[in-house]
Image (tube, rainbow, N blue to C red):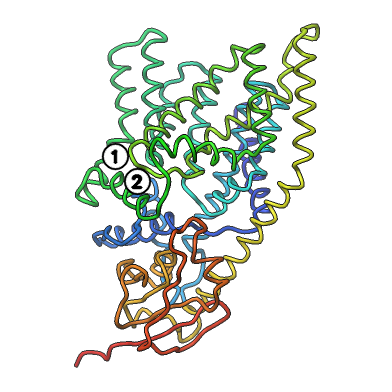
Amino acid sequence: MSGSRSRIQAVAAIVALAALAWLLAGRGLVNYDTLYSLVWGRELSEGQSLVLTTPFAPTLHPFGIVLGILLSPFSKTVAAGVHGVAATDIVLVLAFLALGALIWLTYKLGSFWFGPWAGVLAALIMITRRPLLDFGARAFVDIPYVALVLAAALIESRRRRAAVPVLALLAIAGLIRPEAWAFSGAYVIYLWFSGEHTPRQVAGWLAMAAVGPVVWLLGDWLLAGDVLHSLRGTQQNGRELGRATGLSGIVTVAPRRLGEILREPVLFGALGGLAFSCWALRDRVRAPLLIAAVSLAAFCLLALAGLPIVGRYLLLPAVIGAIFCGAGVFGWRELAGDDKRRRPWAWFAALTILLLIVFAPIQVSRLSNLRYALKRQEQIQGDLRALVQQPPGLISRSCTPISVPNHRPVPLLAIWLDLPAQQIFSAADAPQPSGQFIATASPSVAADYILDPRDKDRSVVQPPASFKSVGSNESWVVYSRCQAPAG
């Protein structure tokens, strides 16, 4: 009975935290990569072969493909006037629930390792980090990946050598991010050397640890004809977008990305919490340090393999940093009342709290900026959808190909128009002589929605003179040059 009650409480807490995250963010928008998963899932469910040569096509995540297939009944054409729950709406609900789970698991692990107040502070830190809320509100798959790894860590922390449930969660995580393969491998080694086992048990552990890489490589082979398609495609996209990678990126960019998530007071508290915990609570430090070490080692290996260094790949070390900050502020409460180490630790905690309070207004400003950015982008995206929906739709699947200023609107229009993504072109990559051209109505729309601050080329392609304007709204202008029907 107590187990059922605790599960109900956990679900209620996750839902409440998801709702709080939604209130802080204000809204959500499904990101480019996840939109492509919905497009590909719909195409596979209809028996189509995937065309993966589209410029800037994202990585083939097995988890995302399965999700896209499951949600394919909801990926219906907006142009046909189909109403009801859309696949993107379901994705956003799942994304905020995953974010709520991540925050709840941060609290549970912080509580288990360094006491309940440390867990509370760690969870509070994470739910107020702009990058985490941004990634969650945009439904990046990195959020459920981190939540799955934290869930596996919590199970193992509560019950040593739990084996199967831990490996099962890591296997699912391995369908989202390849870093999970390192956790599975490290955990099998730990099981192997930490107690008695039978050959059958070891074979089962190895089989579960192999699920992620085998499914990923097999999926690449079946869908792309190349077992290393995801690796090579991600490397190529990183090069074309000018993303940092390699040893220089690890040294110069990765620390800055981690700092962008946690910010100065939390980093200060985390370093102090780590130092004091190693001094006074050494037995509690091993698990979070091992998780951080494996995560960072896997991250470095992928960067050395040519994959880009982006902030969301460092979310798991950031969670561990937040937990250590919680330890830095409240870990001294875990010591005996007469322990002489309490006093210096408590003074450090007071200084960390002061820094957190002083920097709080800046953090509030960052969250306000996030809310504005999401609201602005939702408005621009809503204007684009209106041009598809309004009768008769100015953007129509009857006049193809469709050109857009760059690659960002491609999967969204593919979903709304029920078109293959290869019929929608980025004018920056492949100018089309006919069809429709959707241009931004103003430079601010381009800056707020089309362009990425890290883009090396921030120019926005305009339609050729042969295209004529057929309609517009506040954010977009539709141009057309349709070919006359044959016959």
Q: Is residue 119 visible?
A: yes
Residue found at x 54% / y 41%: 257
Tag 1 and tag 2, C-beta contact below 8 Å: yes
Which image quadrant: the C terminus? bottom left
Residue 215 numbered tag:
1
Disc count in the image? 2
Q: Which residue is mark 2?
A: 62
Residue 262 spot, x, y in % from top left: 62, 38
Residue 333 spot, x, y in % from top left: 75, 18
Q: Foreground residue, 53 or 487?
A: 53
Structural crowding at the residue carrying mark 1, measured as other residues with C-alpha within 10 Å and reported as few (<14), some (14–19) or many (≥20): some
Residue found at x 22% / y 48%: 222
Q: Foreground residue, 443 or 456?
A: 456
Residue 422 numbered tag:
none
Q: Amino acid at mark 2?
A: Pro
Residue 48 position by quadrant: bottom left
